[in-house]
Amino acid sequence: MVALALCVRPLIGQAGVGDSAVVYGAHHAFSLQAPAGWILDVRSQRNNGLPVVLYLRGESWTTGAAVMYVNTVVPDSGVVDAVPEVIRADSERFSNVVPGMHVSVAMRLQTADGRAAEVRAFHGDSGNVELVAYIPARTIIAVVVLSARTRAALASARSAFEALVKSYRFLTDQVTVRPEPAT
């Protein structure tokens, strides 16, 4: 079993080799591979709570017609909610903020390590559309999101989203995150 002892913030994307990253935090570490033509960025949105963001080469996180990001659902209690509960909570939260929100089953994908990713489509009256993959592990649920300004941009980026989700590989739950030393 792999054990990592890291002095990091609670959830970090750490640059790896080429266009890959390891995302780690308390009790989890997983890897992702950027789809062809996409920039995997582990720095620009870290202060906004996003350890990994992706955007098309030649675009940026703020201007891209379609962007992707990765986050996790890490329970305070130590007990991971089931994927349907997390999907239900996300659906309710978005419905309360986005007028005309609709959520539908989009697909089911298999990750590189054989996990089943449940994908939902979110769209409302605002014009933005999202595909959200929920990937369960013993200690977390990884959430991979494709967010687009238009349905056309979503359709254009869909295969890249699928490739990103399929690249997911859970590495270990034996991660200890120590607070950064005071400076």
Image (cartoon, grey):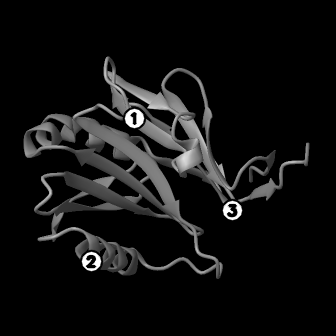
**Vertical arrangement, residue 65 with respect to residue 92, above or below:** above
Q: Nearer the viewer, mark 2 or mark 1?
A: 2
Q: N-terminal of the two: label 1 or label 3?
A: 3
Q: Three-letter amino acid code at disc 1?
A: Leu
Report the residue marked by disc 1.
54
Q: Residue 143 at x, y = what percent?
A: 42, 58
Q: Quick one: label 1, few (<14), some, or many (20+) residues within 10 Å? A: many
Q: N-terminal of the two: label 2 or label 1?
A: 1
Q: Quick one: label 3, few (<14), some, or many (20+) residues within 10 Å? A: some
Q: Three-letter amino acid code at disc 2?
A: Asn
Q: Three-letter amino acid code at disc 3?
A: His
Q: Nearer the viewer, mark 1 or mark 3?
A: 1
Q: Quadrant of residue 36?
A: top left
- Residue at image location 20% in from the left, 36% down from the top: 157
Q: Quadrant of the C terminus?
A: top right
Q: Nearer the viewer, residue 94 or 41?
A: 94
- Residue at image location 74% in from the left, 58% down from the top: 174
**Disc 1 to disc 3, C-alpha distance:** 24 Å
Question: Which element is circle 2 on?
Answer: helix
Q: Residue 18 at x, y = what percent?
A: 52, 20
* 161 with respect to 73 (left or right): left
Residue 133 tag number: none
Report the residue marked by disc 3.
27
Question: Which element is circle 1 on?
Answer: strand
**Disc 2 to disc 3, C-alpha distance:** 31 Å
Q: Nearer the viewer, mark 2 or mark 3?
A: 2
Q: Quick one: label 2, few (<14), some, or many (20+) residues within 10 Å? A: few
**Disc 2 to disc 1, C-alpha distance:** 27 Å
- Residue at image location 28% in from the left, 32% down from the top: 64
Report the residue marked by disc 2.
96
Q: N-terminal of the two: label 2 or label 3?
A: 3
